[in-house]
Every structure is written in structure tokens, then in C-alpha cells.
Image (cartoon, grey):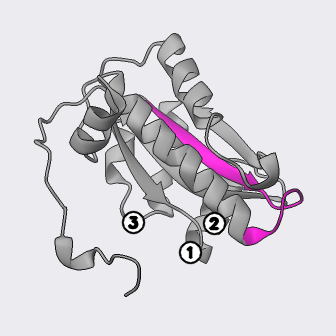
Amino acid sequence: MDAIEAILTRRSIRKYTAEPIAADQIDKLLRAAMRAPSAGNEQPWHYIVVEDKKILAQVPAFHPYAAMITEAPAAIVVCGDSSIGLGDAFWIQDCSAATQNILLAAHALGLGAVWLAVYPIQSRLDGAGKLFNLPANIIPLCIVALGHPAEPKPSKDRFDPVKVHRNTW
């Protein structure tokens, strides 16, 4: 799958088969994440690969939109290190770009994924911090649930020419 096709056909997938994700696929996702652009090349990201079903089952206790994660064979928690980099706005952008790379790479590999936002909602930050034993300077941006898709989802064209401005507003 080429890059444009991956971008135009990627969808959030919330239903997964029980098939595990191969270790080399997880490695490819992490390599794609770490190829994201980074302000000042600070690379403030850290990743937690979660494959323990008992840990995944605890996520919905603090994240109200994460019910699907209990069926996912894996997840990646994308975190930013607030002690390095050029400030909050930049680690958020860097980790968001890394998350998008994970989503696109997962789709290109035939996997399904969905972005579960954690930051900036305090109850989700507290829950993730406790569950994943995060140091104070490590802030969870999101959790990406991953699996082999158990639902077909056709692409949706969201292009809206009304939202395109040329040269000025």
C-alpha cells in the first residue's frame, strides 16, 4: 500500500479478532513512530507496548471510550517526556505526529487501530499514570489499541472545499 492510499483509506477500527500481533509488526510500528518529525529533533517520545490482557482490561476504568481495548491483542501508550524538549506545545505535536505514523503504519500492515486520547483530561492522565507506573515527567498523550480488524470499514471522503482558503482567509 502506498502512502496516499494509506492516508485516504485508514479508518479507526474498534473491533478485533483474537489473532495476536507479530513481534516484527510491533517493531515496525515503533520504528514508524520514531521517524515522525520532532521540533528541534528533541524526540521527547516514549512508548509502552502493552500485550498483557489484565492490564488492557483496566483501561476502561479511567477511559470512558476505551471499551474495545479489552478485545485488542495489543496497545501502544504514546508518552511525552516533559523534562526535555522545547515546551508542552512541542512534545504534544511531536507525539501526535508519532501517533499518526503508528495509525498509518498499522493500516499499511493490514492491522486495525484506534487513537484513544488521554491528554489533557486529568482523570485519564491520573488513571494512565497509575496503571502504567509513569514517572512524573512522563505524560501519556494517548493509547493506540491495535489488532487484526474484525470489521470492514470503507473509506470516507471528508474533503470539504469550503474549508480551503487560498493565500488569505
Q: Which residues are magenta?
A: 74-88
Tell me the CA gap for discs 2 and 1. 6 Å
The answer to whether residue 162 is left or right of residue 63 is left
Residue 52 lies in the magenta-colored region? no
User: Disc 3 marks which residue?
Assistant: 64
Instruction: Tell me residue 76's x, y (percent).
Output: 55, 39
**Which residue is at 54% across, 55% downward?**
142
Identify the residue at horizontal 32%, vertical 26% (top origin). Answer: 2
The disc label shown at residue 27, or none: none
Q: Residues within 10 Å of mark 3 (few under 14, many from 20)?
A: few
x and y, in percent, of residue 57 in the image: 45, 44
Res. 58 visible in picture:
no
* The N terminus: image quadrant: top left
Question: In the picture provided, is 149 more to the left or to the right than 140?
Answer: left
* Real-space Cα separation, disc 3 to disc 2, in angstroms: 13 Å
Q: Are marks 2 and 1 in contact (CB under 8 Å)?
A: yes
Q: Amino acid at mark 2?
A: Leu
Evaluate if marks 1 and 3 touch, with contact meaning CB atoms under 8 Å apart. no
Which residue sits at x=68%, y=51%?
Answer: 79
Q: Secondary structure at mark 3?
A: loop
**Residue 125, which numbered label?**
2
Name the quadrant containing residue 96: bottom right
Amino acid type, mark 3: Pro
Q: Residue 121 bears which disc, if any?
A: 1
- Residue 65, percent across and down? 36, 62
Mark 2 surroundings: few (<14), some (14-19) or many (≥20) residues within 10 A = many
Tag 1: residue type?
Ile
Q: Residues within 10 Å of mark 1 (few under 14, many from 20)?
A: few
Q: Between 63 and 41, which is closer to the camera in this rendering?
A: 41
